[in-house]
Image: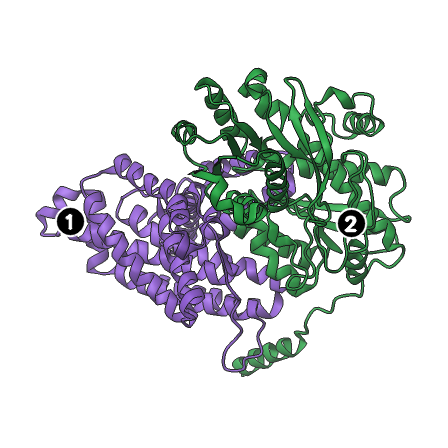
Amino acid sequence: MMARARIVGLVAVLVVALALPFFLSNFRLFQFTQVGVYAIALLGLNMLTGYNGQISLGHGAFYALGAYTTAIMIDRWSVPYPLTIVAAGVLCLVAGFLFGIPALRLEGLYLALATFALALAIPQILKYFEHWTGGSQGIVLSKPNAPWGLKLSPDQWLYVFTLAVLVVLFVLARNLLAGRTGRAVVAIRDNPIAAQAMGVNTALYKSLTFGVSAAYTGVAGALSAIVIAFVAPDAFNVFLSITFLTGIVIGGLASISGAIFGALFIQFVPNWAQDISKAAPWAIYGIFLIGFMYVMPFGIAGALRRLAARAARRGTVARA
Amino acid sequence: MLRRTVLSALLAVLALVVPATAADTPGVTATEIKIGNTNPYSGPASAYGTIGKTLAAYFKKVNDEGGVNGRKINFVSYDDAYSPPKAVEMVRKLVEQDQVAALFQTLGTPTNTAIHKYVNQQKVPHLFVATGATKWNDPKNFPWTMGWQPNYQTEARIYAQYIMKNFPDAKIGILYQNDDYGKDYRKGLHDGLGDAAKKLIVMEQTYEVTDPTIDSQIVNLKNSGANVFFNVTIPKFAVQAIKKAHDIGWKPAHFLNNVSSSLATVLKPAGLDASKGLITALYMKEITDPQWKNDKGFQDWVAFMKKYYPEGALDDQGNAFGYTVAQAMVQVLKQCGNDLSRENILKQAQSLKNVEFPLLLPGIKVNTSPTDHAPIEQEQLAKFDGERWATFGELYDAAKK
């Protein structure tokens, strides 16, 4: 019963998402495309932090790596943009996996600090390799037009394209996390010693989770480069990594749908805060944050799950 | 059946989707004209946010006095936190949703680079951008974008001219920030020196904006035997450089870029004694300079600040900068008369002829044309006498060469 309700819900969400391009202005669509991009990045971080219990304050670095991979490939070698996204994902997978190996020795807050260093370093590293990255000038790209003669504006096309990538990656993530691998990943978070005793190769799983997580965030970064049509080091400062962490906590840790709620939050709430008060938008944002954490301690996804559970219980009681 | 209904409904919606038809004069009504802007009110560059606040305050003053040609200026300014993606989003909001007539004084080199192509595709006037990079003066490729202040290369060429004339046996040491801002200055100096550059420049040192100190660079420059120091640093490092050079007893002819010419944020912290003899190029009246105390333009500005922006600092040159560039925008709108189409706004912005503004140095005239998108190209050298910048010599005009 629950399962069917869930599928119906999912289909409804997808239909609404697909209908958006026909109702919204190009600007609004652009904003929702950014939501999709953020959602992919948040899902990546959530796998690592929410499911596997490794805190990263440096996912902005992988986002940047993905963005620059795409930008450089398009700018230098005129590679078709869908291919560059795959390349960005693979590169970040490898980078994340490699970073995950030394990170194995670091637990909790120590890992958070190590990744934080990554976030701090990335803007400077990008400026250093100026020959490739264009330094602080960045790289300007062109927005792709819709292929196959589709009558869509570039914004509409990018929205649909991002949505497609998002759906594929979310289905993959769900399959990965719902099965044997997912159980191992969660077991490591909950009790690493017990997990090891059960025969889970903790070292391998932790590094792999880091890799996959980085790959998701890298793909998101690659998409962002195409959507914004510009990359520059100033876009990938420490604050971006913190924003991602905010997003997964607000959206709901260890929840797939939480990534979408978190993405909506980090995209729209700062804008609302600015509309409410020009003088102190970040104070308003802070109030929103505290409010959300107070009312929904398990994030938006957690709160919805609770509501649904309560409704289901009431339903059974009523029927009985 | 249901499916078919849904499908046909969807198709009907599809058919209804027509590209939003823009009015002839977006952002303009009988009583109002909408001007868009982004500024870093938060984030790493938030010190510049005061410029945006001054702009808003100045337009309020104009509106209180009846507006321009009977229309009030509706100044819409958003925070981009100096982040290029945020700037893209906010500028798209301004253009597509708020339907502003023109963009004005969007601040920052990376942020303006991110929107450069977009605004030109959309054919929205992108006027008097708040950055000194040289690329905004490129009317051939980006006809809708226009700079404002003398760009970095212009300024550096002026120093080069002066050095060639007065220090024929100069040994020049350069310290510059390793990014486009620093390199613009460097290029300007090299271009200005021409063939002599190879002979005259004895050492070039760089630093990263994130470096904690530049002490070792200063020591290296001293040891190179340089007797002319071209100091291309932002305020934080300018303070360090002036102090360090003074401490180690290095006394070159010290050229300090205009970016760091502020008395309050650079020279005072560095020490007025250590700052004695510095040379810079100015185009605006330094508001902390007592010589302007009785100047009408300065007094008007103070009165404006007290009434419309009382929380703004009276020793922050950014507030004088915003005041002046807002006056230029009002001048453009005045010239537009009743035709506030985007085409005409651009056309009038390109038709500024010998306009003077009260806080520019006496004699500096703003000129633009369809092939000249660099409004201010004149500067005057000034030497710090321990109290104030004393201007000397003639006005240099980079456009004349």
The C terminus of chain A sits in image quarter = bottom left
Residue displayed at 50% across by 63% down: A141
Q: Is residue B178 left or right of residue B366?
A: left
Please tell me the colour of chain B: green
Task: Residue at the far top: name it.
Answer: B273
The image position of residue B43, as x and y in percent, is: 53, 38
1 vs 2, front mark: 2
Q: Nearer the viewer, residue B188 or A306?
A: B188
Q: Chain of mark 1?
A: A
- Picture quarter containing residue A298? top left
Which of the colour schemes (rainbow, by chain, secondary structure, one colour) is used? by chain
Q: Is residue A94 left or right of residue B242?
A: left
Q: Which mark is residue B287?
A: none
Badge 2: few (under 14), some or many (20 or more) residues near its Cα, within 10 Å? some
The chain holding disc 2 is: B
- Residue positioned 37% across, 48% down in the render: A61
Identify which residue, A19 or B191, lies in the foreground: B191
Q: Is residue B269 above or below residue B57?
A: above
The amino acid type found where label 1 is placed reads Thr
Q: Pick the quarter of the image with the N terminus of chain A.
A: bottom left
Q: Position of residue B79 (x, y in %)?
A: 61, 43
Residue displayed at 61% across by 57% down: B116
Image coordinates for residue A82, horizontal then vertical, percent: 40, 70
Q: Which residue is mark 2?
A: B367
Numbered marks: total: 2
Crowd tier of the residue under label 1, counting other residues whose Cα lies within 10 Å: few below 14, some 14–19, many 20 or above: some
User: Which hue is chain A drawn in?
Assistant: purple
Vertical placement of B192 versus A208: above or below? above
Q: Which residue is mark 1?
A: A202
Element type where label 1 sits in the image = helix
Q: Amino acid under label 2?
A: Asn
